[in-house]
Amino acid sequence: MKTTIGQRIIFLVVLLLILVPTIFPFLWMLLSSFKSQVDIIAWPPKFIFEVTLRNYLKVFGEQQFLRYLMNSSIVGISAVALSLLIGLPAAYSIARFGQRKLMVLILVARLMPGISFLMPWYIIFSRLGLMDSYTALILSHMLIALPVVVWVMSAYFETLPREMEESAMIDGATQQRAFVSIILPLSTPGIVTATTLSFIFSWNNFMFSQVLSMAKTRTLPIAIYNFMSYAEVDWGGVMASAVTIMTPAIILTMIFQKYVVKGLTMGAVKG
């Protein structure tokens, strides 16, 4: 069935209505990161301006960005790895044995606002002497990553037929061996999806690092906060920090986009 010119025009208009509100803030942030403070706050906005790299030099030179990058990487990778180690067997158990109450309990932890965990975490970690440690941040970030892993993978495991495991167990394999040798290799799109989403959520988290860390273990979102003071806001530094922080997440999403889409759609359709 051929599409008419009118249908194409309608499609393009709808596409623009969706894309403009989504892309415009990022483009504005990207352009502002190359502007001076005067050009950023100018009204009407300047679209022709003198490009400067001063904001990025501040980010990498004055704000210890590489240290924050290392801290975010350590916390994000460790939290996601531990969440996968715990979450994959949990999601498999939920999918195969219908443990819906456990599923609801895990999702409640994800739906609760993160700020509700701050005071208990602060008291526990301060009493244990774990403030400003990777342990405190990794455990707190698992509150973000673990429910995502369980939510995505339990839906994905339900799409896999039980007959594959049953055939393996008839041949002498235990259910644990069938899970490791058969189910996990077939679940690569779902695992990539859960890993990507949980890592991005951890990477962008600001609240836990602001409260539970100090100079030693602060993560990337704190780099943005450092450009804000009582007297003024260095908008150029804020924009440059935001662009730099978002870039790895965007690259990761673009690389694994195919797997993320496949993992989410497979988890949404049973059969």
Image: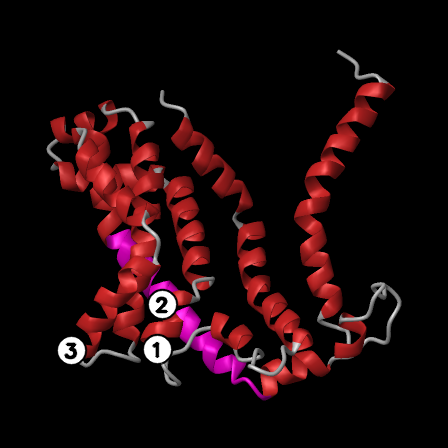
Predominant secondary structure, magenta span: helix
229 relative to 174, above or below: below
Q: Which residues are magenta?
A: 62-85
Q: Residue at x 85, y 66 (%)?
A: 46
Q: Residue furthest top?
A: 1
Going by the numbered disc 1, the residue's amino acid type is Ser
Going by the numbered disc 3, the residue's amino acid type is Arg
The residue singled out by tag 3 in the image is: 127
* Neighbourhood count class around disc 2 (C-alpha, 10 Å): few under 14, some 14–19, many 20 upward: many
Whether label 2 touches label 3, CB < 8 Å = no
Q: Residue at x 28, y 24 (%)?
A: 161
58 relative to 224, above or below: below
Whether label 2 touches label 1, CB < 8 Å = yes
Q: Residue at x 64, y 77 (%)?
A: 237
- Disc marking residue 213: 1
Dot 3 lies on which element?
helix
| Image quadrant assignment for residue 73 | bottom left
